Amino acid sequence: MRDALMNLIVYQGDTEFASVEQQRFLFNSAPSEYDRRALTRVMIEEMRHGWQMCALLIEHFGHSGKVEAQKMLERRAFENKRLLGSFNEDVDNWLDFFCYTDFVDRDGKFQLQMLKYSAFAPLGRSMSYMLREEAFHMGTGNTGLQRIAEAGVVPGWLLQKYLNKWISSAYDLFGTDHSSSAHWAYVWGLKGRYDEPKNQAQVELDDLNDYNRQLYRDEVATLLARISASQKGGQAELYTPHIKFNRQIGRYKGMKFHSRTGEPMDDKPYQEHLEEFMPSAKDRKLLLDILGAEKNWITPRIGVRDPLETIGEPRKSAMTTPIIN
Ligand SMILES: [Fe+2]
Ligand SMILES: [Fe+2]
């Protein structure tokens, strides 16, 4: 139990530091001073989350906790040392950043909420503070995507490709189906379900990760419907990729499904489908051209307070509702 618990804390902390390292190039290309300061705040808070996990390891896990905390501080995303593969990749443009904060930080929120029910009180207690800060990160991502949709300069089809890429990889972050570590983390009281207090149903121990993943998908779908509705006229509706699409782990790993409908597909049509609905090197170049050359690819943020001045202020919406700002 102790090892499983230490492992949960190590993985959580590792992603916190990793995200700062992944986003380190974004300052120079910030679309506005507001966005640069929002990025700064996100990084300050992610660093704090990492330190908080280190503090738990040092205070409660003896010598091995200190060793793990030190290793966590010495790993680097840009040396490919972070524990989860997707946390080693650079996030080097602002569309990726907004997708990251909306969808990967949102996975983070789900993980933190589940840890909030931990029977290990020092861990459970630290979660409320982190969740409060996560709300700002998700809000930054979600309003960022909304502002891009409103501006209408990045074509909707290109935006959809990036949504497909990020959301499908966020599904994987919930872990494999039929996971025995999720099973035991629940049985031992280290972690709860995302909707624990209001969910009175008998727990399905064999499929916890997928249960939480479905809740995540539902939340993302609600948000995306709003982003889609704020597009300029004539753009195709933006959608949430199907839970089976482009999965690298779990029961749908490596299988071929349609991004929107989840219908099984044959090899050749699937290859063509990927070209149409996942970003290629050419798409990336087009995106960077647009972000580099166009001034108006994102609408300005007006009448909002300086993110660095409001740091540490409680956000009421943090615990219960998905969006913010
Ligand atoms: Fe965080
Ligand atoms: Fe975050």
Image (cartoon, helix red, strand yellow):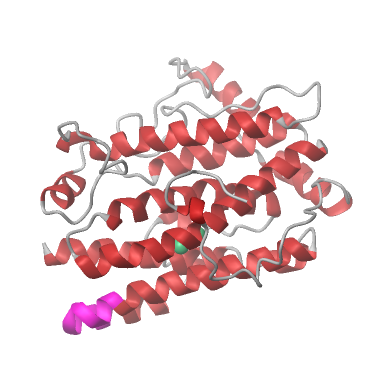
What residue sits 76% from the left and 24% below the top? Answer: 235
Determine if residue 88 is in view: no
* Left or right of 272, for residue 68: left
Question: Residue at 40% across / 77% down in the picture?
Answer: 51
Residue 123: image x %, image y %? 27, 66
Image position of 313 with respect to 252: above or below: below
Residue under the point 80% across and 29% down: 232
Q: Quadrant of residue 55?
A: bottom left
Residue located at (51% from left, 69% from top): 45
In the rendered image, which quarter is residue 188 located in? Answer: bottom left
- Taking the magenta stretch, the answer to whether it contains residue 70 is no
Q: Which residues are magenta?
A: 56-68
Q: In front: 86, or 205?
A: 205
Quadrant location, the N terminus: bottom left
Foreground pick, 252 / 139: 139
Is residue 194 depicted above or below 314 in this figure? Answer: above
Q: Is residue 312 visible?
A: yes
Q: Is residue 179 above or below residue 155?
A: below
Point out residue 124 in the picture as x, y percentages from the top left corner: 27, 62
Q: Quadrant of residue 237?
A: top right
Majority secondary structure in the magenta region: helix
In-image side of 170 versus 236 (left or right):
left
